Image (cartoon, grey):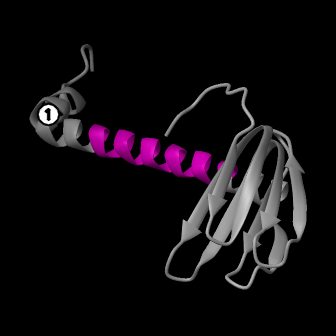
Amino acid sequence: MLEGDFRTDMKVSTPVNTGTVVGTDFGASYDAESNMSVWEIYDGSLEILSHITGEKRVITSSYGSPIKRLTVTADGVMTEQTAIPRNKWALTQENNNMTWLWIAILIIVVGVGYFAYRNKDKIMAILKKPKAGI
């Protein structure tokens, strides 16, 4: 996969359609078994042309906005939808952060438990040590 800024009249073609890159970050996939294409736009615009129906659509998005997805079926039908709505993306990120927090807490608890087990005799000696003057 190539990454970077490319200044070109680039077109990506599948057997059922062609997408023209218009200064953008995007993803494209094609399933040969179902003859279906999926386009996602992350930043910028994509112009997609169905070779079957002749229909042309432009999908646009920008960083921080919902990711737009255009699916083109084997018969050339185009369906536009939101890949991941902003509110669900934020929720996903919050859940990922909470997962890491719980993992960190678990590691700390296990570490403290292991340390206490390995040093139980020393810990018990400290706890049972008589206090001076009593």
At label 1, the amino acid type is Asn
Observer able to see residue 133: yes
Q: Position of residue 100 (x, y in %)?
A: 51, 45
Q: What's the magenta region?
A: 93-112
Q: Is residue 121 left or right of residue 132?
A: left
Q: Position of residue 70 (x, y in %)?
A: 78, 66
Residue 132: quadrant of the picture:
top left
> Is 42 drawn above or below residue 71 in the view shown?
above
Of residues 48 and 28, the one nearer the viewer is 48
Residue 17: quadrant of the picture:
bottom right
> Is 61 drawn above or below residue 71 in the view shown?
above
Of residues 69 and 115, the one nearer the viewer is 69
Q: Is residue 100 magenta?
A: yes
Task: Tell me the SS state at disc 1.
Answer: loop
Q: Where does label 1 land, which residue?
A: 119
Q: Is residue 117 left or right of residue 85?
A: left
Of residues 77 and 50, the one nearer the viewer is 50
Q: Position of residue 49 (x, y in %)?
A: 81, 63
Give the residue at x 20% y 24%.
Answer: 130
Observer able to see residue 83: no
Number of numbered markers: 1
